Each structure stands twice: as structure tokens, then as C-alpha cells.
Amino acid sequence: MREEISNRLASLSIRDLMLVAAVDRCGGFRPAAEEMGISVSGLSHQVRKVEAVLGVTIFERGARNVMPTEAGREMLRHVAGFLRHAADMGHAADRRAGPFGGRLRVGVISTVGPFLMPHVVSLARDWHPRLELALMEGKHEGLSRRLRDGEIDLVITACPHADEAFDRAELLSEPFCLLARADNPLAAGGPIEPERLAGLDLLPLSEDDFPTETAPQGAHRAGMRIFRSHGLSIETRVRLVSTHGYACLVPAFTCGELTAGGKLALVEILNRPVGRQIFGLWRRSSPYAAELGRFAAAVSVFMRAP
């Protein structure tokens, strides 16, 4: 039955059905022909073609007017429904015709998100004003899983992730600085030598500060004691520094605005013993892989800008 219906309707075009609907809407062939930009004889021929294919007389043709037959009214309801669905499909195609199929889904780890999210929005708008942008923030493992499952298009993370299913681009090399209260002696006098941090009990680093499989070896060589935490956000670390006088290592660019107000100081560590790489990841199999690579390159240009 499905093949029979398909074969019967294959000779009809959307234009044919639009002409039939116009005759019904205008109440006659002449006004419908004028509206649709076709001759009256051409319109009549196309309507008879539709009637022949459907095996139904749609219109009763009188000397002065045209009106649907009883069977024609039923067919016209189906024609109207079909044309509505066709219009919806056209609108959906228009929305999806731009970059990334009209919608870009970006996931960013939480220790990069506050710094990067506003600029991703600006870049996406510059990329295509009508692009729909979906943003999410989370931990590396959860975001990479959603990327693998097709729920995200691009992940920005501190983990390179050796997965053959992903392409990647290095976006930025980001050093860590010391965040301390402005009245802390370490905050006086500008950049400090790594040796001045030796033996300090620094607040733990989040698992998203570094890939879990990468130890900050430079910090250990400098004598720092580096601890890890699970889920200790930058906001929590900032509050602990501000309230209790702790010190902690934080990503320099991501946390560059934390010192607003003068209560906290971000202190550069000479020779950059601790740092991380920021990567963009996307599925190699994505139909938008080339576009995602170009977008990641644009993000990298922004992140590297002074």
C-alpha cells in the first residue's frame, strides 16, 4: 500500500497542490490564475492533472463560479494540511541552513566558563547573527561524555583527551598565579620567585584545573605542595582566600577579574612553574567538523589577544 500511494502521488508537485488550494481560496480559476501567475488554461490543466492522479473530482465547475464537491472538500483539507507541513519544513530548513545547522552547542569546564562564556556568545553572533547558541558548563568527564553522545558540538577543556573519535585544537597556554589577600606579604612587591611558595599549604586545585592524569610537576620541583579537590569551585576558593586568609593557585586569565575591589591580589609567579593547556574538542564524525575547527581557531585568537 505504501508503495502504491507513493507511486500515485510521485507525479504531483507542491506547486500543483498550491494551485488547487488557490482555486478554492479565490473561488474561481481566473482570480486564482492571476494570484498564482499562470494562465487560466494552464491552471485548469494542472487542476485536472491533480484530480486524475487522486481519482477524485475536486471542483464542480459552473458557468459563474467554482465550488468543491463533497469528496473535494475532504481532499482540500488534506491539501491544506500537507501545505502547512511543507511550509513548516521550509522554515525549519531555513533555520538549519546556516553554520552548524543553525544551532551551536558549546560545553565549557567550570574553571574556564566565567572568563570565556561571554566572549563565545559574541563570537557566535559575529559568526552568524541568526545562529542559535546553547551553552552548558560542567566537569570535563561529563562534558566529554555528552560530546561523544552527540549532545554537544564543541567542548572547551583543560584535558586533551586521547580519544580517536575527537579532533582537537590547542587554544591557549595558561599560567597559574597566586591568589592571596591584598594584605598578605606575598602580595607585596610584584612577581615572586617559585621558591617563596615552597612549603606553603595552598588551597586544593579542582580536578578541572588540570587533566586528572597530569601532575603539575613544575610545582613539585619548586617545592610547592599541590593538593587536589573534587568540585571545589573557583568561587569557593576566592571566598576562603578573602575570609580566612588562605592562598591558592588559580588560572591567570580565567581569574583576572577576581581582584576587582582591591581586597585580593593576583601575584605572578616567575618562570611559570605551573600552567595548563586549554583545548577545543569536537567529534571527528560531525558534519560540521570543518566549521567547528574554524570556530575553535577564532576562539583561540580571542584567548591569545592581549
Image: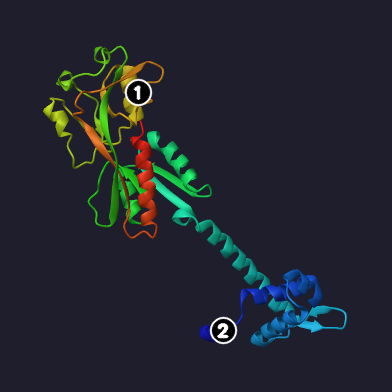
Which sits earlier in the primary sequence, circle 2 or circle 1? 2
Residue 50 x, y percent position in the rendering: 67, 82
Instruction: Establish if 114 lies above or below 242.
Output: below
How many discs appear? Answer: 2
The reply, left or right, for residue 206 in relation to residue 84 is: left
Q: Nearer the viewer, mark 2 or mark 1?
A: 2
Instruction: Establish if 168 lies above or below 186.
Output: below
Do the CB atoms of the residues marked 2 and 1 lie less than 8 Å apart?
A: no
Instruction: Establish if 299 lies above or below 229.
Output: below
* Badge 2: residue crowd in 10 Å (few <14, some 14–19, many ≥20): few
Answer with the quarter of the image where residue 255 lies: top left
Residue displayed at 72% across by 81% down: 42
Q: Residue furthest right?
A: 64
The reply, left or right, for residue 193 in relation to residue 103 is: left
Residue displayed at 26% across by 29% down: 176
* Badge 1: residue crowd in 10 Å (few <14, some 14–19, many ≥20): few
- How was the colour assigned to the protein in this rendering? rainbow
Residue displayed at 25% across by 46% down: 160
Q: Which mark is residue 239?
A: 1
Residue that label 2 marks: 5
Residues under labels 2 and 1: Cα distance?
A: 69 Å
Dot 2: element: helix
Residue 145 x, y percent position in the rendering: 31, 52
Which amino acid, by three-letter code, is at mark 2? Answer: Ile
Q: Which mark is residue 276?
A: none
Instruction: Establish if 185 lies above or below 225.
Output: above
Dot 1: element: helix
Which amino acid, by three-letter code, is at mark 1? Answer: Arg
Answer with the quarter of the image where residue 109 lies: top left
Residue displayed at 24% across by 29% down: 204
What is the quadrant of the C terminus in the image? top left
